[in-house]
Image: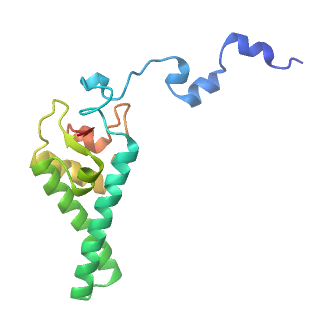
Amino acid sequence: MSSGKGRQAEGPRWTQTWLGGARSAGVDLGTPGERLGLPAEGSGSVAGYGRRLLALLIDWLLSLLVASLLANMLAWSPPTRSLATLVIFAIQAWVLTGLLGITIGKRVTGIRVARPDGGPVGPVWALVRTLLLVLVIPALVWDRDYRGLHDRAANSIVVRV
């Protein structure tokens, strides 16, 4: 019976490359956004996960605050307040992204939504992006350029300002 030390000279085990993804198999994926002609770092580069999640959290908390204020004034039940939070979040994300390319959370974190060529997303594609965003699952499936399915459907990308 061998100790397994001889296997390391042959290269990684197939399970290590399969479980580790393309990079562990020796495939060079480049930097996020490179395929789209975006810089690797600085202004115009693809925004990382941390900034995007923080922006989402800020936008959600602001929507929750507005819904809570309305719920207190209008005596809404908790389920109604929850639905109102989602609707308020969707409206502010759609309108602000469509008109300005940023939401309040994105402004605070220094990121914006744009087309890969740098142009504005526009109201129609911002609506498509927002509807898929509130479904949650499309936003959780990302490609190597950190574009969720909602961004791919709207031909948009989140970049640093």
Is 44 on the left-hand or right-hand side of 8?
left
Residue 44 drawn at (x, y percent):
23, 33
Res 145 → quadrant: top left
Counting labels gives 0
Give the residue displayed 58% in from the left and 31% down from the top: 19
The residue closer to the viewer here, 151 or 160, is: 160
Residue 15 drawn at (x, y percent):
63, 26
Give the residue displayed 34% in from the left and 78% down from the top: 79
Give the residue displayed 10% in from the left and 45% down from the top: 122
Give the residue displayed 36% in from the left and 53% down from the top: 54
Is residue 26 shown to the viewer in this render? Answer: yes
Res 1 → quadrant: top right
The image quadrant where one finds the C terminus is top left
Residue 92 drawn at (x, y percent):
18, 60
In the rendered image, the vertical position of residue 148 relative to residue 53, given as above or below: above
Is residue 141 shown to the viewer in this render? Answer: no
Res 9 → quadrant: top right
Is 66 on the left-hand or right-hand side of 95?
right
The residue closer to the viewer here, 110 or 120, is: 110
Residue 114 drawn at (x, y percent):
18, 39
Q: Residue furthest top?
A: 10
